[in-house]
Amino acid sequence: MRKVFLPILLAGLLAAPAFAQVEAPKLAETAPDRYVVVPGDTLWGIAGRFLKDPYRWPDVWEPNKAEIKNPNRIYPGNILVLDRSGSTPRLRLATVKVDPRVRSDKSATEVPSIPSGVIEPFLAAPLVVDDGGLASAPKIVATQQGRTFLGTGDVAYVAGSVPDSVTTWQVYRPGQAFIDPDTKENLGYEATFLGTAKLERKTDPMTFRIIGSKQEMGAGDRLVASAQPSLVNYTPRAPANDIRARVLSTYGGVGAAVAAAGSNQIITISKGKRDGVELGHVLALYSFGQTVRDPLQRSGGTITLPDQRNGLVFVFRVFDKVSYALVMSATDPIRTGDVARKP
């Protein structure tokens, strides 16, 4: 029996199709042979000058290891050279001497991956917390002169324990629940950022001064130690594994929830660390294929429309089950329920 099985197995392997090769990245129609990096550039913008799909940057970048350790560390004044001679285009840093006026200053900040000003408000706030995730955080229990709401300059009295090493705190209120549209799982709660407060006296209750107010705050709101925003500087790339997420919410230019988002606006998606989502991942956006009535069937039959590709997003903040992403391009408004998946 074994002698019969082996030839069959070998024949099956020989007949199996070979693995499809990944298509080489395509150059942009106006891709330059060389480009001098200037202040204000982003890695995404530079990649878009050379490639039709900027997230294919890792496939063409050929770092000069004597000058650069990873694809992010590119500085104003660097010269990028495009080599078209091989089957796959390659980008590298020029080794020629540069005019001193545009020479890269290694003490300068490297080119960011995406526009930092747009995402900065979302790097430290809001938070995504589990059910009851703020329950043990210090709580405002009383307000100055019994006021209903507090604003900048007002005093808040806080119960709880705080370390002496932290003086500046962010004030939050439990917000909307993120529910996966497909599985109905509760993915966590978005804690709404209300403002900042500074510890003045460790009395009982403690005395805090409101030093910044984004929304009105009051008794019952919670304090979380302020985190220093860390700008994202990761290579844009497609995920290695298949990821299919749904858009949970959309935000306008000032961080307010809006009905639909477009380019340079923020969205949340229903996948996070546990699903393999990483900082720098680029996902393709699709308008979710709705189920509609089939006009050709009198019995009330339905048809499901295909998802329609709509743009690209760059993941810049990742929680366990939820991620925030910046919309890099969109041909139509992006709405809650739309799909984000590996491009």
Image: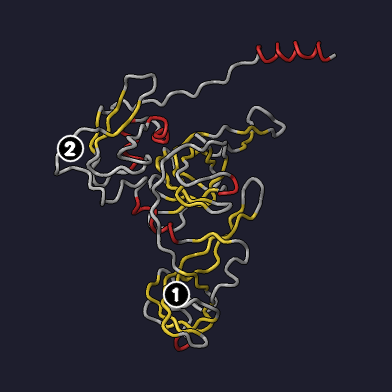
Q: Name the residue under label 1.
A: 165
Q: Taking 176 as reference, is 195 left or right? A: left
Q: In which quarter of the image is the N terminus?
A: top right
Q: Given the current orientation, which residue lies at the most extreme front position?
A: 66
Quadrant assignment, res 34: top left
Q: Which amino acid does the dot numbered 1 rest on?
A: Ser
Q: Label 1: how many residues lie within 10 Å, few (<14), some (14-19) or many (20+)?
A: few
- On the image, the x and y values in percent for residue 312 come to 44, 39
- On the image, the x and y values in percent for residue 205 come to 52, 86
Q: What element carries label 2?
A: loop
Disc 2 or 1, which lies upstream in sequence?
2
- On the image, the x and y values in percent for residue 318 come to 51, 51
Picture mark count: 2
Quadrant assignment, res 30: top left
**Front-most of 251 and 118?**
118
Q: Which amino acid does the dot numbered 2 rest on?
A: Val
Q: Taking 187 as reference, is 103 left or right? A: left
User: Residue 98 has which mark?
Assistant: 2
**Front-most of 28 and 36?**
36
- On the image, the x and y values in percent for residue 147 come to 46, 84
Residue under the point 71% across and 13% down: 10
Q: Taking 9 as reference, is 158 left or right? A: left
Q: What element carries label 1?
A: loop
Q: Label 2: how many residues lie within 10 Å, few (<14), some (14-19) or many (20+)?
A: some
Residue under the point 49% across and 24% down: 22
- Above or below, 187 against 155 in this view is above
Between the residue at mark 2 and the residue at mark 1, the CA separation in whole angstroms equals 46 Å
Residue under the point 53% across and 38% down: 341
Coloring scheme of the render?
secondary structure
**Front-most of 150 and 101?**
101
